[in-house]
């Protein structure tokens, strides 16, 4: 089976978004993101609000977004999902003039990403991220937050805030395990400021997605979230880092048409 296609290589950060938007405006019906979560984020960002359908061939380190969508991480199997041509309108998150498709957040996970950068030049796979976790644990920071979710305003001392359209960060950590990118809602996980020893005991539960009922964790659903923080704070957008506080999160329902597994399109049909 043969299909005509063209391809483009990204040249710099943000180029994937520009290429995707230009292709959509040119009338392309399908665009496939070939790469990791950063590439997926850029291509999806360029396709928000268009009729162009997006697919994913995972060639990254973490490949978190394909886990969310149930797409196989083996590229040949992922190609079968693309060829089956089953699109579904997926939600997208919007924060500080940027889009994200999976998880955004700040605190410990951003510190891990920053530490991870110095290790990935020497090591491959998940080892740089694991070393980043160990390094970030030695510099555990408390964030003094004011949060607004449209209904209430409250203050919180926290270590991690994860705002999930999808479930995974860091190559498989289930930060917001019940998040559904098709339901028009974020799921938010806020880990309270606790001692390093207590956080170490909590971390395995956080990785497995078994932390949502713990007393140290506040877990809730919302369509929007506004957060202020006096501490210097970068924001994680699907594994990429950007400008800091304050942040205003909004969900954009059905913003990108994504090629998914059959069981997901069946669920969409049942919802209709």
Image (cartoon, rainbow, N blue to C red):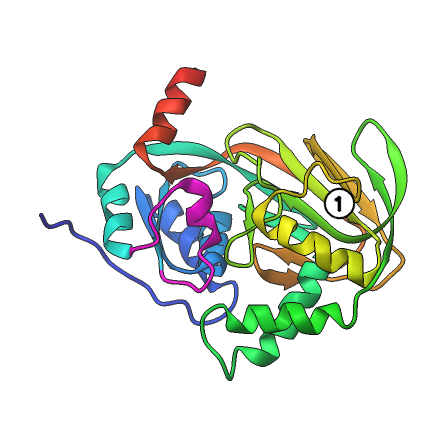
Drawn side of residue 228 relative to residue 120, left or right: right
- Residue drawn 64% across and 49% down? 205
Which residue is under mark 1? Answer: 190
Q: Which of 220 and 230 is in front in this view?
A: 220
- Residue drawn 34% across and 29% down? 263
Rate crowding at label 1 as few (under 14), some (14 to 19) or many (20 or more) other CA atoms within 10 Å: many
In this rendering, the count of numbered labels is: 1
Please state the horizontal and vertical placement of residue 97, each as a whole percent of the image: 66, 50
Please state the horizontal and vertical placement of residue 120, each as a whole percent of the image: 53, 77
Please state the horizontal and vertical placement of residue 267, each as a whole percent of the image: 40, 23
Q: Nearer the viewer, residue 97 or 183?
A: 183
In the displayed structure, would residue 11 be above or below residue 63?
below
Using the rendered image of the protein, determine whether residue 28 is visible from the camera's viewpoint: no
- Residue drawn 89% across and 37% down? 154
Q: Give the range drawn in magenta.
A: 59-74
Instruction: Name the element at disc 1.
Output: strand
Confirm whether the magenta stretch covers residue 106: no
Where, quadrant-wise, is the C terminus in this rendering? Answer: top left
Please state the horizontal and vertical placement of residue 16, each as a whole percent of the image: 44, 60
As drawn, which residue projects farthest toward the left?
1
In the displayed structure, would residue 74 be above or below residue 154?
below
Q: Is the magenta stretch mostly helix, strand or loop?
A: loop
Using the rendered image of the protein, determine whether residue 156 is visible from the camera's viewpoint: yes
């Amino acid at each position: 089976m043969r299909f005509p296609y063209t391809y483009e290589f990204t040249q710099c950060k943000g180029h994937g978004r520009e290429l995707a938007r230009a292709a959509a405006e040119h009338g392309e019906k399908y665009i496939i993101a070939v790469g990791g979560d950063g590439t997926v984020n850029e291509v999806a960002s360029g396709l928000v609000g268009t009729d162009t359908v997006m697919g994913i061939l995972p060639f990254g380190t973490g490949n978190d977004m394909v886990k969310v969508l149930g797409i196989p991480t083996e590229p040949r199997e992922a190609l079968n999902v693309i060829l089956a041509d089953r699109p579904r309108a997926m939600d997208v998150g919007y924060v500080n003039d940027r889009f994200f498709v999976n998880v955004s957040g700040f605190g410990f996970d951003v510190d891990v990403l920053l530490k991870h950068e110095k290790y990935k030049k020497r090591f491959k796979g998940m080892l740089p991220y694991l070393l980043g976790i160990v390094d970030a644990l030695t510099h555990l920071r408390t964030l003094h937050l004011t949060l607004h979710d449209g209904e209430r305003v409250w203050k919180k001392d926290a270590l991690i805030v994860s705002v999930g359209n999808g479930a995974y960060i860091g190559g498989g950590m289930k930060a917001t395990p019940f998040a559904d990118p098709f339901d028009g809602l974020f799921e938010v996980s806020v880990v309270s400021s606790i001692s390093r020893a207590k956080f170490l005991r909590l971390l395995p539960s956080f990785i497995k997605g078994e932390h949502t009922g713990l007393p140290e964790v506040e877990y809730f659903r919302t369509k929007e979230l506004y957060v202020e923080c006096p501490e210097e704070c970068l924001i994680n957008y699907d594994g990429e880092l950007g400008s800091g506080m304050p942040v205003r999160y909004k969900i954009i329902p059905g913003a990108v048409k994504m090629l998914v597994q059959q069981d997901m399109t069946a669920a969409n049909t049942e919802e209709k």
